Image (spheres, rainbow, N blue to C red):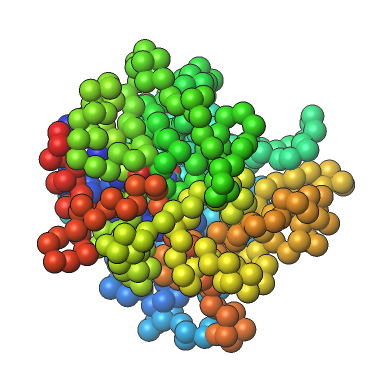
Amino acid sequence: MSDLPKIIQGGMGVAISNWRLAQAVSREGQLGVVSGTALDQVLARRLEDGDPGGHMRRAIDAFPFRAMAERVWNAYFIPGGKAPDRPYTRLPAHGKVCPRPLAEVGIVGNFVEVWLARQGHSNPVGINYLEKIQTPHLVAIYGAMLAGVGFVLMGAGIPLKIPAVLDAYVNHQPASYPLYVVGAQEGDDVIMHFTPRDVIEGDPGPLGRPRFLPIVASNTLAVTMLKKANGKVDGFIIEGPTAGGHNAPPRGKLTLNDLGEPIYGDRDVVDLGKLRDLGAPFWLAGGHGAPGALRHALDEGAAGVQVGTAFAYTEESGLRPDYKQAVLDQVVAGEARVFTDPVASPSGFPFKVVQLPGTVSDEAVYLARPRICDLGYLREAYRAPDGTIDFRCSSEPVSIYVSKGGHEEDTVGRKCICNALVATAGAPQTRAGGRIVEAGIATSGDALPGISRFMRPGSTRYTAADVIRVLLSGD
Ligand SMILES: Cc1cc2nc3c(=O)[nH]c(=O)nc-3n(C[C@H](O)[C@H](O)[C@H](O)COP(=O)(O)O)c2cc1C
């Protein structure tokens, strides 16, 4: 691979861009990116499913700290997999302080995903995190760096304090990260800490410093990152509002179209000329998964494009097969539809939802689900009246959310996308002795209808290599 990739396969959580997909993309000489979201949960559930194929075991065998590796394996592995009506184990909740067992499954989970993605080729692999999901950052990044991750990409927030974390871990030095706490007061201790020496076994050598690419939606944020980040920013992903997953909200006052989707305007358009003047490499994301799009991006001075939706439906992606096939069939039938939901995600960011019967996009499925918050990645930290830090989520039971000072109106239409996204990766939580199984939620960009261009003749299927071939064909 030349120094910088022309195509970045965007990170897609939870476990849609899994190690298999990222490996396939990096093998082709482009940049494969694993999703770093909830990898503690993902690893635990794969082990509780009996580790089909033995891939987790293979990666865990390569983990440098042997006692930790075996503790994680022993805590979750169930030979032959758990009974279908048995729930997955509930992991300890994330908080300002990460409990040791959670830190261990987080470190090993991130290691495993990156390590597997790096097998069979010598090209770099990246990992993607959402800044908004702050509590796992410190352990997650350490695990990914132990596996030699080449790029860290981070969106959904302003990750000013990440570069120093990357720098510190090169020599296993302690790192810290400020937790955003609603209502925090001067003097409150909001800093999270992680000290690698507390978990290290033996004497590991120095780690490579991954390149850091924040994902931003405006010139202002790009400038802020370059001026105010606490270390090196190696480039940007410039993501527009047509991209799959979460989108940055429109600038200014939120207005909705007739369908109820946010309206974006001129102020949301990034000025590529000004961006070029910053001198850092950048990749364009959002609707660039078509032949000719790469050439256009290069002509605009970009280093390339980041593409998500096209890769989400490849053979290799972690999207569960029934949803994948159902959406591919919708695409072929000309019936695929994506709704930019301004309220679905407790993160507060607009979230693109594929309209797919049987998933949470289906009003009946959404309404039938009791509000339960037991994964908690998108919970927000707030200052409780006694000065301690507590957590709340606008998709948890309304009375609980309100009792924590949340506003009732903020709960309307909120979906537990933590449980739904883990279900979409094929590991739905089971409740009430198997009578309740969490439904998933599929997200894609506005360009979803166009993915038929990647399908093989006579088939709806295609691979990551097909996508790359088509995207490079217009170059
Ligand atoms: C299924 C799916 C999940 C996504 N999840 C994430 C994510 O976890 N983090 C992130 O930064 N971007 C996420 N994205 C955005 C992609 O990384 C990428 O920037 C975007 O899909 C590019 O636009 P496109 O969908 O038009 O190709 C997701 C996109 C899709 C389709």
How far from the left and from the top, in percent, is residue 287?
Answer: 34, 40
Q: Residue 227, position in %: x, y?
A: 50, 17
Q: Is residue 461 visible?
A: yes
> Could you tell whether 108 is left or right of 28 in the image?
right
* Depth check, front residue: 460 or 165: 460
* 384 over 272 or under it: above or below: below
- Which residue extends farthest right? 386
Q: Is 397 situated above or below 322?
A: above
> 209 or 449: nearer the eye?
449
Residue 315: % across, % down: 24, 63
Residue at x-position 77% and y-position 36%: 184
Residue 132, can we see it?
A: no
Indicate the quadrant containing the C terminus: top left, top right, bottom left or bottom right: top left
Tell me what residue is drawn at x 38 percent, y 77 percent. Answer: 50
Q: Is residue 409 left or right of residue 57?
A: right
Quarter of the image with the N terminus in it: top left
Pick whichever, 341 or 439, lies toward us: 341
Residue sitting at x 15%, y 37%: 474
- In the image, residue 68 lies at what x, y percent? 46, 61
Quick check: 398 above or below 183?
Answer: below
Tell me where residue 10 sits by quadrant. top left
Q: At 36% from the left edge and 15% from the top edge, which residue is drawn? A: 273
Quadrant of the rendered structure where residue 91 is? bottom right
